[in-house]
Amino acid sequence: MKRWMWIVFAVIIAVGVGSYSYTRYRLQEESYADEMRTGERALKNHDYSLAETSFTHASRTRASNATAQRYLTQTQTFVDGTQAMNNRKFSAAKQDFTTVKTTKHGSTTLIQQAREQLTLLQKIQDKRKTYQQQYQQALTLNKANEFTDSNVVIATLLKDKTFKQRYYQDIRKNVLTLRKQNNASQTKQRFT
């Protein structure tokens, strides 16, 4: 009789451990799926901080899962690219966005956003080139003592609403300094 009780007891223990393991596995799977969905929604809403947090949790829930880690790395690279672009480090931004865009089996949302950022980056670089040329034209006129003509070029630049964006602040600062020099030189010419 004792042997029979031990067998029943062993079966009950085995069923309990198996049930616990299965329940724990199911909870981990649900947690992983929830974190991945939250991360994807966050990407669509451009909430990269929440996306990073969600993908980090998902990668910890399933340590061997490459998808969560890939999405996390892709998100971090995208954020790095955005920061580089805001700091006018355009070659670093281009490299980061290209990495995000070419990630195999990566987030399609991030791939699309990286494509958009690369297009925007190209437009910004083209505009910077145009603005820099206009600034150089105004500077050349300034050096030729054509202060009024230099200010006309500067006025054209300053009327452009795009020129006020953060991507062009360094050029804008130079333009404003040049305008100040032109105005001071014009005032000096009038009194001499």
Image (cartoon, rainbow, N blue to C red):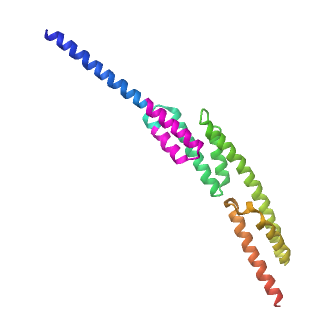
Establish if 20 lies above or below 111. above
Locate residue 117, reporting x and y percent.
67, 47
Q: Position of residue 103 (x, y in %)?
A: 62, 37
Q: Is residue 128 visible?
A: yes
Q: Is 37 left, or right, of 88 in this rendering?
A: left
In the rendered image, which quarter contains the C terminus? bottom right
Of the pair 180 and 44, the residue shown nearer to us = 44
Residue 20: where, in percent of width, then height?
A: 32, 25
| Residue 170, image x, y percentages | 69, 65
Residue found at the very far left of the displayed protein? 1
Task: Check residue 145 for magenta coloring.
Answer: no
Q: Is residue 20 left or right of residue 167?
A: left
**Residue 50 magenta-highlighted:** yes
Question: What is the magenta range?
Answer: 29-57
Residue visible at 75% across and 78% down? 181
The number of numbered badges drawn on the structure is 0
Residue at x 44%, y 34% (from the top left corner): 31
Task: Answer left or right for 143 relative to 82.
Answer: right
* Corner quadrant of residue 161: bottom right
Q: Quadrant of the N terminus?
A: top left
What secondary structure do most residues of the magenta stretch adopt? helix
Asked whether residue 62 appears in the rendered view, the answer is no
18 relative to 131 in the view: left or right: left
Identify the residue shown where x is 52% and y is 36%: 37
Quarter of the image for residue 7 reads top left
User: Which residue is located at x 22 percent, y 13 percent?
Assistant: 8
